[in-house]
Image: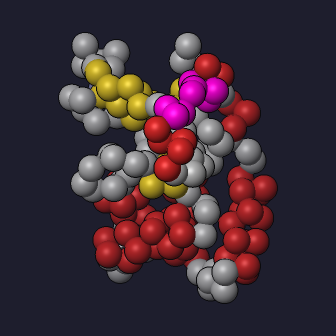
Amino acid sequence: MIKHDDTKHKNSEEELQIFQKACKKHGLKITPQRIAIYQELKSSKQHPSAITIYRKIRNYFPNISLGTVNSTLLTFAGIGLTKVVESSGDPKRFDPDLKPHHHFKCQKCGKIIDFYNNKYDAIDVPPAIRKRFVVLNKIVQLEGLCDRCR
Ligand SMILES: [Zn+2]
Ligand SMILES: [Zn+2]
C-alpha cells in the first residue's frame, strides 16, 4: 500500500521555474533567502516545520530569524507553493507535495509518511456533509506507530 514515488521529485530547475512563476504572479520579491527556504522545503521528505527549515537555512543565512522563515512558509502556502498539513498541531508542518495523497502519522515520533491509494482518493463523502458543504479536498490520515517506533 505504501509506495515511494520517485517521479514526484521533479528536477530542481523545473521547481525553480514554478517558484519564480508563482512569485511573479503574486508580486512576491525573489530573494536568495526565499529561494533557499523553498529549495529546503522541496528537498525535504519529512513534512518539515518552520523550525526544521530554520535550523538548515541558518547555516547559509546566519541572520535570518525563525519568524521570517515561518512567515515565508505561510506566504508560500498562501500562493500555492506548499500546503499546511491539517491537524498536524503545533508547530505547523508543511507539505511540499501538492498532488493528492494521504498521510500516516506516527503518534510517538511525529513522522508523517506520504502514501498514495486510489480507493482513498475515491472515498465517498457522507450525504449529510455533501448536502451542507462543498468538499474540495479529501485526505485520509492514519495514525499509529512507524516502523522504528513499533
Ligand atoms: Zn515513529
Ligand atoms: Zn504529504
Tell me which residue sits at (27%, 56%) in the image.
91
Please say whether residue 150 is visible from this viewpoint.
yes
In the depicted structure, whether residue 30 falls above or below residue 115: below
Question: Which quadrant of the figure has residue 142?
Answer: top left
For this rendering, which residue is in front, 115 or 12? Answer: 115
Would residue 123 be counted in the magenta stretch? yes
Please report the residue visible at 65 percent of the width from the left and 42 percent of the height from the top: 99
Q: Is residue 112 magenta?
A: no
Asked whether residue 4 appears in the rendered view, the answer is no
Q: Quadrant of residue 20?
A: bottom right
Q: Main secondary structure of the magenta part?
A: loop
Residue 2 position within the rendered picture, expressed as x and y whole percent measured from the top left? 54, 18
Q: Quadrant of residue 6?
A: top right
- State ligand 1's quadrant: top left
Residue lying at 62% horizontally and 83% vertically, measured from the top left: 28
Q: Which residues are magenta?
A: 120-127
Viewer-nearest residue: 43 or 73: 73
* Residue depicted at 74% across the width and 63% down the height: 18
108 lies left or right of 112: left
How far across and down, in percent of the image, does residue 12 sit?
A: 71, 53
Quarter of the image for the N terminus: give it.
top right
